[in-house]
């Protein structure tokens, strides 16, 4: 009982600190500019921390160790190369354009460049995609609660009982985060993110140190790694020889060096150049130079973070090989559920106090990602839709009231999506976390990025009608190439779904945004811009 009391004190201290910092920023959110961008006066290093907090969700905290456990190598870290390259491009082209036009919602740039229809379509794509992606990963930190219940209270927990446990935790975490986000705006988000990143790094560092001490150190880590250790050049698809067989194999593999240089570059261009959730953080810096510094350095910081979480996953495999008496949570097929390996270790094998710190780290990742999502969703909805439909209040106080209403609205919607995901996960425990989260972006963000690139890198091409057709084409092509038609057919009970040629690849999630961008750009560039919407020569 004393052990649980100490862990509870650590968690209570964390919640008290976060709420105190968040609520202390209320005085800085009294205007539209203050609520959404902190009057563009946030220090670059705080912006950097906020970007990291938005990126490192609880899905990464559990999902990446799960990938390390399942693959027992560092091939996932190859994607960091593209992440860093994309940040350089975003800093050189996207951020200066947004500062030049003084936008609050990033989709205002598209109205300046093309027209109101492109802005509304793009903003709607962001709202739906971010809502689904953030909501679907919100359930992840509650894995600890459900797993703890199974371990300490009732090992025979039914799927329905799991769902209600998920539901209670989801509502509690979301309401707590919504309080300080609604009252404090972007300043509360960023400064609580700073604390949350410190707690996150501490939790990861102590977890790695503890696992090294329990398994035998770095030598054991090296012996556990499975080849290829870092770089996967890809292999021909089974049954398809020659050049096309190799290309098909690369497109159907999640983590290869080609996915790192091409696929993940486009993923990050989309998430850091066109996603209001991320860009809003960047635009809160004092100028485009400080924003670029925070953006690029966040990519550098991603490398050691992912090295730590993957090392934790590899060491977890070694730990449970050394301790076969410890029975891991299992999938329906009987194999270990990689998404629950790290939470299970936290609950059953970590020392008192450290366990509370790591649980706080998990909550920090969840609340950091959730607060940024709430703030950006409210900003995009209010700026791009609400003011158009209902009119813009004449005073700053009125505008901020609407923004706070938007924050509460999306808190409710995120809870709804998270509950739906929890229901699916409780009844289908074989689902993997990382591909689900990144896959949601893949279907839509290629279309978004294609239009933004058209606006930034051409002067007289693209218009509202052409962009709408191009974005639809991009979504349909990606849906087909990724096998979405097959999944839909199965869901509707149409047997094996639609047939497709055997040579046709079913592309993995790192490639979806690239193909969507190429198709969208290729179609939209065929249409000419209106004269008053062309960039200056």
Image: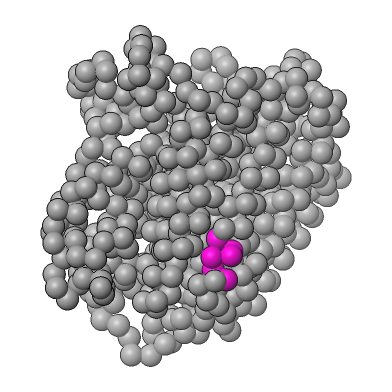
Q: Position of residue 346 (x, y in %)?
A: 73, 37
Question: Residue placed at 29% from the left, 28% from the top?
Answer: 483
Q: Position of residue 37 (x, y in %)?
A: 49, 75
The furthest residue to the bottom: 395
Question: Residue placed at 43% from the left, 81% from the top?
Answer: 32
To which quarter of the image does residue 314 belong?
top right
The furthest residue to the front: 537
Question: Residue placed at 43% from the left, 40% from the top?
Answer: 262
In the picture, which quadrant includes the N terminus? Answer: top right
Position of 170 with respect to 221 (left or right) is left
Between residues 323 and 207, which one lies in front from this camera angle? 207
- Above or below for 279 versus 300: below
Question: Residue placed at 50% from the left, 44% from the top?
Answer: 82
Between residues 96 and 63, which one lies in front from this camera angle? 96
- Above or below for 352 versus 327: below
Magenta run includes residue 124: no
Asked whether residue 1 is in view, the answer is no
Labels in figure, total: 0
Q: Position of residue 117 (x, y in %)?
A: 19, 65
Majority SS type along the magenta span: helix
Q: Which residues are magenta?
A: 290-295
In the picture, which quadrant includes the C terminus? Answer: bottom left
To which quarter of the image does residue 112 belong?
bottom left
Q: Position of residue 529 (x, y in %)?
A: 16, 65
Coloring scheme of the render?
A: one colour
Magenta run includes residue 291: yes
């Amino acid at each position: 009982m004393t052990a649980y009391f100490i862990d509870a004190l650590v968690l209570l201290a964390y919640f008290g600190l976060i709420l105190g910092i968040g609520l202390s920023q209320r005085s800085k959110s009294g205007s539209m500019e203050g609520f959404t961008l902190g009057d563009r006066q946030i220090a670059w290093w705080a912006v950097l921390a906020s970007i990291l907090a938005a990126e490192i969700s609880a899905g990464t905290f559990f999902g990446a160790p799960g990938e390390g456990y399942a693959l027992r190598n560092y091939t996932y870290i190859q994607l960091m190369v593209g992440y860093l390259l994309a940040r350089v491009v975003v800093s050189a082209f996207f951020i200066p354009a947004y500062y030049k036009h003084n936008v609050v919602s990033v989709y205002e740039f598209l109205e300046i460049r093309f027209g109101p229809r492109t802005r509304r379509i793009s903003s709607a794509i962001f709202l739906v995609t971010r809502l689904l992606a953030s909501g679907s990963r919100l359930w992840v930190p509650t894995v600890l609660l459900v797993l703890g219940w199974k371990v300490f209270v009732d090992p025979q927990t039914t799927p329905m009982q799991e769902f209600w446990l998920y539901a209670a935790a989801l509502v509690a975490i979301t309401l707590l985060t919504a309080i300080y986000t609604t009252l404090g705006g972007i300043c509360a988000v960023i400064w609580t993110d700073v604390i949350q990143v410190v707690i996150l790094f501490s939790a990861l560092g102590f977890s790695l140190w503890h696992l090294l001490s329990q398994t035998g150190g770095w030598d054991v880590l090296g012996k556990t790694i499975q080849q290829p250790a870092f770089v996967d050049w890809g292999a021909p698809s089974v049954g398809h020889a020659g050049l096309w067989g190799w290309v098909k194999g690369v497109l159907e593999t999640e983590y290869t060096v080609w996915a790192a240089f091409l696929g993940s570059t486009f993923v990050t261009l989309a998430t850091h150049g066109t996603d209001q959730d991320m860009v809003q953080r960047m635009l809160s810096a004092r100028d485009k130079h400080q924003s670029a510094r925070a953006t690029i350095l966040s990519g550098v910081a991603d490398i050691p973070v992912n090295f730590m979480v993957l090392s934790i996953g590899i060491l977890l495999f070694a730990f449970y090989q050394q301790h076969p008496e410890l029975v891991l949570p299992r999938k329906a097929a009987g194999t270990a559920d990689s998404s629950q390996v790290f939470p299970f270790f936290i609950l059953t094998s970590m020392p008192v106090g450290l366990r509370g710190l790591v649980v706080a780290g998990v909550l920090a990742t969840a609340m950091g990602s959730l607060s940024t999502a709430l703030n950006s969703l409210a900003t995009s909805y209010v700026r791009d839709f609400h003011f158009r439909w209902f009119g813009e209040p004449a005073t700053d106080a009125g505008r901020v009231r609407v923004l706070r209403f938007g924050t509460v609205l999306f808190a409710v919607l995120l809870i709804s999506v998270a509950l739906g995901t929890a229901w699916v996960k409780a009844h289908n425990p074989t689902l993997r976390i990382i591909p689900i989260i990144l896959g949601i972006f893949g279907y839509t963000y290629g279309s978004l990025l294609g239009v933004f690139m058209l606006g930034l890198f051409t002067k007289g091409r693209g218009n509202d009608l052409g962009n709408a057709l191009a974005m639809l084409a991009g979504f349909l092509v990606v849906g087909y190439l990724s096998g979405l038609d097959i999944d839909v057919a199965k869901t509707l009970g149409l047997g094996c779904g639609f047939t497709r040629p055997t040579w046709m690849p079913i592309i993995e999630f790192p490639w979806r945004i690239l193909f969507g961008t190429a198709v969208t750009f290729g179609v939209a560039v065929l249409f000419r811009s209106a004269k008053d919407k062309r960039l200056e020569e």
